[in-house]
Amino acid sequence: MLIATWNVNSLKARLPRVEAWLQEVQPDVLCMQETKLKQDLFPTDAIAALGYESAHFGQGQWNGVAIISKVGLENVMQNFAPGIEQDEEARIITATCGGIQISSCYVPNGRELDHDHYKYKLSWLGRLRQHLDAICTPADDVVVCGDFNIAPEDRDVWDVTQFENATHVSVPEREALANVRDFGLTDSFRRFYDDAGLYSWWDYRGGSFHKGHGMRIDYHLVSQSVDERTTWTAIDRNARKGESPSDHAPVLIRVDD
DNA sequence: ATGGTGGCTGGGCCA
C-alpha cells in the first residue's frame, strides 16, 4: 500500500499536475493539504475518473484538506474528534483506508514566534494529540501525515543559522510535535534516511529549489505496527520541477500488507 | 536590493 502526502497549494491551480502525478505514481492513498477549495468545489468526478474515492474538508481561499483512496474510505471525520475544541479552519481530516487510520493534516504556519498564530500552532498540535487519544490507541494501524510546518531537527533545514528566532525550528513547536509523536508514532522517513539536505518544501522565491534551500516539513508519523511493515519511502522531487509546480513535493511510504 | 514568487483575489494577505 502506497500512502502519499502532498501540500498541493491550491487544487484548482494544481489539478493538472495532481492528475498527471496520480496516473504516473498510482498511490493507493493521497492525502492533500491546502486544497483552497470550498467544500462542494472539490473535483470529485475528475478524481473518481482516476479510480479514487474522495473525502474533503474544504474551506475556500485558504486551508482545506483531503484524502483520496483506491482501497476504501471509511469513518470519515472532519476536524478534531467530538469533545475536543473544534478548529475554526479546515486543517485535518481522518479516514480509514485499507485498514489504516489516516489523518491528513495542515498544521498552522505560526508566522512569527510572538504572533498569535504561533500560539494557535501550539494549541493546534496539542489538540492533534487529544484527537489521537480520543479515537485510537498506539496499538492500532495509524498514519498521521501532512504539512506539519515544523522541521523536526536542524538537519531538516538547509541552514539553521538562517532560522534564529524563526518558526519551523523553535523549541516549543518541536516539543509540541514530540508530544504528538509520544502518542506512539515515529517519523517514518528517518528510519530510511539519515542525511541532511533532504527536503519536501522549497520557497518559490529566489530560486530556492535550485539552490537546495529547503525544509523537510512534510512527513508521515506512523504507529509501530505500520512502521514494522513500512519497506520504502521517497520524496518525489521531480514533482517540484516543471511548469506550475506546488512549492511542496509529495512524500510517499510503502506499507506491506 | 529589508527584496524575491505564487496562490487567493480584484488590494492586500498569506505562505
Image (tube, coloured by chain):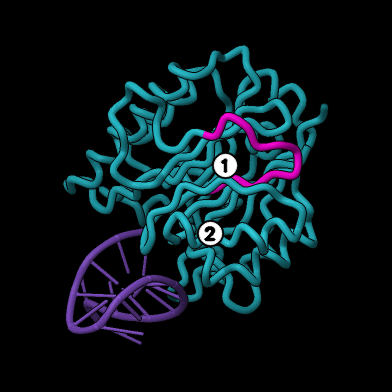
Chain colours: A cyan, B purple
Using a 10 Å C-alpha cutoff, classify the residue at mark 2 as few (fewer than 14 neighbours), some (14 to 19) or many (20 or more): many
Q: Which residue is mark 1?
A: A219
Residue A245 appears in which quarter of the rendering? bottom right
Q: Is residue A189 left or right of residue A159?
A: right
x%, y% of residue A52?
Answer: 71, 50
Q: Is residue A68 magenta?
A: yes
For residue B11, which quarter of the picture?
bottom left
A250 or A135, which is in the foreground? A135
Secondary structure, mark 2, is loop
Q: Give me the residue at 49% from left, 19% from top.
A: A135
Name the residue nearer the viewer: A91 or A42.
A42
* Residue at the spot of label 2: A42
Numbered tag placed on residue A48 in the rendering: none
Which residue range is magenta in the image? A66-76
A248 is higher (above) or lower (below) than A2: below
Query: Does label 1 or label 2 sit earlier along the sequence?
Result: 2
Whole-number angstrom distance, CA of label 1 to CA of label 2 = 24 Å
Q: Secondary structure at mark 1?
A: strand
Left or right of A111 in this view: A105: right
Residue at the spot x=50%, y=52% of the render?
A33
Please say whether residue A47 is visible from this viewpoint: yes
Crowd rating for badge 1 (residues with CA inside 10 Å; few <14, some 14–19, many 20+):
many
Q: What secondary structure characterizes most of the magenta part?
A: strand
Question: In the image, what residue type sits under mark 2?
Answer: Phe
For image coordinates 34% across by 52% down, the residue present is: A163
Which is nearer the eye, A121 or A90? A90
* Image spot of residue B12 (x, y percent): 18, 75
From the image, which quarter does the C terminus of chain A lie in? top right
Q: Are marks 1 and 2 in contact (CB under 8 Å)?
A: no
Of A90 and A169, nearer the camera is A90
